[in-house]
Amino acid sequence: MNDFVTWQHAAQAHTEAVLQRLLPAANHAPQDLHAAMRYAALDGGKRLRPMLVLAASELGERVQAACEAALAAVECIHVYSLVHDDMPEMDNDTLRRGKPTCHVAYGAATALLVGDALQTLAFDVLSRPTALPAARQLQMLNVLARASGSAGMAGGQAIDLANVGRDLPQNALEQMHSLKTGALIRAAVQLGALSCPDVSEAALAALDEYARKLGLAFQVIDDVLDCAADTATLGKTAGKDADADKPTYVKLLGLDAARAYAEQLAADAINALATFGERATRLRELAEFTIGRKF
């Protein structure tokens, strides 16, 4: 097991432990809702966004409580988006992270509430007092709010739904995915860095360029895997985008060209980290992981 894999497993285990602690207990009323929240959020997924928070926090002297709040908050937003995305009104999927989707396991009404509750929990956790200056903490809240709303993830999802069955040019496709997928990836990197009071605005700008390229690379590879991988490997239904006639990079560029484009985006992301030296090692490795992943 190489050094990055060891770090990755430790980061995933740490994320799981933080979520276990911060999610409401399943035996607290309303029990069904809390059990469903834990079902959706625990025991699965790559945990890429929390890993990005942790990796970016290595660039300075992080406030541990703020970093843990950030990784939990960004994962709660991500999971809420998956729960809603899987529902019949959107992608109508039955498998997520290798198990039945939340609405299949708990019903559509409960799944809707799970998403709502995870979204509000994210901001509850991120707003709790830490040793960070108050202005820095408010900046973190603003970053996550903008990334998850109509100017970010939710807006990208709306554009995606509006363009089923249509062919989009590459600039429109990238705009859609920079919101739907990229906004939360950019927020994860910003939140990790903001948990360090000593990371400068100039450093935040360089990190945002890294995250912008990485977010697009992630989505391009997602499109490749939807075509090239199987359901058992992905832990979700393979081929759904093609079946739904959604605009994708594979549909636009072809499989090999899409994979090559993802590799170029990842290289560009890594180049944006040049000024950080060895402190950005994990961020570089996460870019490589993003395009080398199998699920």
Image (tube, rainbow, N blue to C red):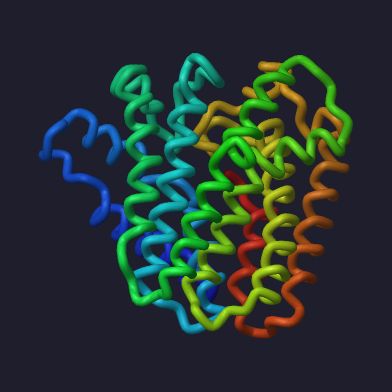
| Most foreground residue, 158 or 251 | 158
The answer to whether residue 242 shows anywhere in this view is yes
Query: Does residue 169 sit above or below 26 in this rendering?
Result: above
The answer to whether residue 55 shows anywhere in this view is no
Quadrant in the picture for residue 247: top right
**Measured from the top left, where is residue 161 in percent x and y?**
65, 21
Query: Does residue 278 sit above or below 99 in this rendering?
Result: below
Residue at x 51% of width, y 27% of height: 85
**Measured from the top left, where is residue 150 in percent x and y?**
60, 35
Quadrant in the picture for residue 38: top left
Residue at x 44% of width, y 65% of height: 137
Left or right for 101, reference 214: left
Residue at x 47% of width, y 53% of height: 47
Left or right for 84, reference 30: right
**Measured from the top left, where is residue 287 in percent x and y?**
67, 62
Q: Residue furthest front?
A: 135
- Quadrant including the C terminus: top right
